[in-house]
Amino acid sequence: MKKNSILFKYLISYLLVLFIPLFILSAIIKYYFIKTYSESVLKQKAMQIQQIKSSIDIQLNQLHNFAIQSSSKNIFSRYNIENNPSSFNDIMKEIRYFIHINANLQEVIFHLKDSDIYYMSSGTSKNDYIFTNIMNYEEISKDNSLAFFSNLDAPIWLKAQTVYNRSISNENIITYIVPCIMNESVIIYQITTSFFNRLFAENEDNIESSVLLLGMDNRLIYAYNTDKDFLNNLETIIAVDTGVMKEVAVAGNDYYIYKTVSDLKSFVLMEIIPKSFIEEHVNKFSQIYHVGLIVIGLLGMLVIYWQTIANYNPIKKLGNTARAANLKIPEHLNALESIEFAIENLSKNSSKIPERDVEAMRELKLFHLLRGQYKSVDEFNNDCKGLDMFVLGNRFRVVVLLTEFNSEYALPEPQIFDQLRDMMRIDYEVFMLEYLEQFSYIFILSREEHSSIEHSDGEYSKNELEKRLRFLQMHYKEITGSSLTIGIGYEYNNTGDILLSYNEAKNAVNYKLVRGADSIIFHNDIHRNISPIHYAYPKAELDSLYYAIINGNTTKIEFITEILISLLRKEYHSLFLAKCLCYDVINTALRAVHDINLSISFFDKYNKSEFTSIDEFIQVVEMICSEIIECMDGNKKKYASLDINAVTAYINENYSDPNFCVSSLADHFNMSISNFSHQFKSYMSQNISAYINNIRIKTAKTLLASTELSVSDIALQVGYIHSSSFVRKFKQAVGITPGEFRMGSNISLSIDK
């Protein structure tokens, strides 16, 4: 025998299967995925700079909104400033508040163009003083400030610079000036560079990128993490196209530059990324990937070697066994060839198939027959030669027997169904299949077209079959003590239609839910019962059940429940509709119980996960409704003795509390809101909210007429937090405002005097 030749073939084939895909995958990664990864890194950087742009746009949008709002406010109007000596105080308050909610602002300055006064959060200053002693701009001085601001008709940036004297602040300030056309003014926003530093620093991701903030005229406003090489080559950098990541050479080094423009058309943002850092990221990813491939290759080799040995050992043992059988196997054959030689010799000497294999083959052929894979009886019989199984009849029907697998009894032994099959063989050829996954057995019945159980007019007697099946049920129940539901399909005269009969039998047996356990269900009976009927959904009855529970009408609950149960038993033959109605009845009852906070728990009494018949559904419905009625009868005494005087007294004590409401009132008396409201209205002929509001208005009228308290104080005393709500409610109830009512009361008192 050839030593280990099969082992080497196995090993080489497995290694080829492993390494060929690995080499192909490695090449794809090198020439495609690494490039894609590089592009994804650059795309991510572009998205990050877009996010920074959006953040700056949001900040600028707030500044523009404040400028627009200020130009329309009276306190910033020229008339108010010129005629109101304290106007500067109001302007300072507005500016301070805006700086308070915008932590990125160093200062906000308001200035009328033809004036020499500047309004700041800390006070006011004149032109000569502010640009000499407080702020020093390269672009603005005391001499040109009037002309600078007068000619300003669009927002403008001033580059980052140290504006304030060192005694005030050393931080660089970026200034953004917005002109206001409505009142001929400008608002000067001084933004700290730390705001931009934070935004730009979040964008680095271990890549030392630089960021430039430019005005729309390409003037440099602020540069982050840049050196002189960038600033000396600014024209080259600015020339790149917008929205495209472009590779540019600057001072002998390669960089990726991305340029984007503000949505407000207020600034240009540019990011400059060193190409070397991108390459480091890509190379690191490539190294990790190739190390991973090497590890996978080594592990794969170990697994392949172990698997090859494991697969070869049985072959080697079989080859040795074959050689030990004295079959005169030639020495030049390897293990696999030796086994093949031995099988051929054995098959020549013995053609008998073991009984266990025969049973498995019979079951396989019957499943093929059940699926309609045989076009004729002859084809089936030819395929079953040697299996001692053949069909003589030319009429076929499928019967499905569903066991009661949810019962307390153990699963019946297969021998019982063998007995049932033998009992059916009096009139039929019977072939049985076990379908234990669904706890059912399948009988394929066959008979000749003109048999003893057929009427003279040629129609098959359904009654005879039903009697036979009923007898089977009785025998099964006598032996096992559990139920057996039987579904029967149509009878066909073609083997290819057996699958149709099987599907019909399955559909029929599913109607156990409607017909109940221990039923014999013909598919044609189901079709005849459900096809011509149009079912009316009992919406009115379900609504009546809901409101009967809500209102505690136990007599009506019993009456409606009986109607719905009658519908389920007598009119709903459709399996789908019967299930739907059962669940709707249960859901309606539980919803009503939830809405009135009735303390009932059903889950510890009935926790079955699946219903097998309508009777089980009806038991649950009856149980739920009886529990509801029992609970309501127990609560009637408690709720019938509700002391309305105690309720009104509690309202009189607490109506002045602004948090006093119907919910707190119902909770105090341990009742649901709906039930409490219903009983209160039956006593007082008005709802609770109206009653409380009337008491508050009545008390308010007394206080308006007899005291000098303000309307706001009176509103608080009678339970209103906001005086506007009190005035609206008062006018709705009385027809006039509280002030008008007080004035009328005072006039009446004067006349009486």
Image (cartoon, rainbow, N blue to C red):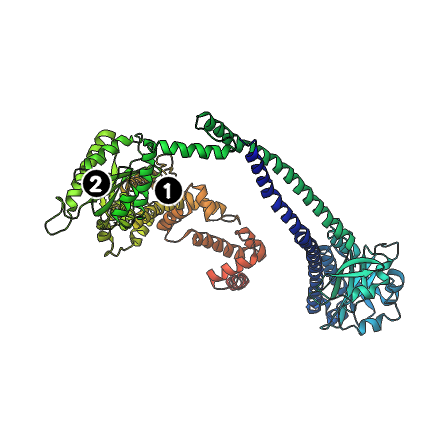
Q: Is residue 380 left or right of residue 674?
A: left
The residue lying toward the viewer, choosing from 437 and 217, is: 437
Q: Is residue 10 left or right of residue 282?
A: left
Q: 134 or 621, which is in the foreground?
A: 621
Q: Quadrant of residue 169?
A: bottom right
Q: Is residue 486 above or below residue 576?
A: above
Residue 311 position in % (x across, y down): 52, 33
Q: Amino acid at mark 1?
A: Leu
Q: Is residue 91 above or below residue 652?
A: below
Vertical placement of residue 567 versus 216, above or below: above
Rendered position, 51 above or below 604: below
Left or right of 17, for residue 400: left
Q: Residue at x 21, y 48 (%)?
A: 394
Q: Would you name the residue on which mark 1 appears?
A: 642
The image's mark for residue 429 is: 2
Residue extending furthest left? 456
Q: Position of residue 619 (x, y in %)?
A: 29, 39
Looking at the image, is mark 1 or mark 2 earlier in the sequence?
Answer: 2
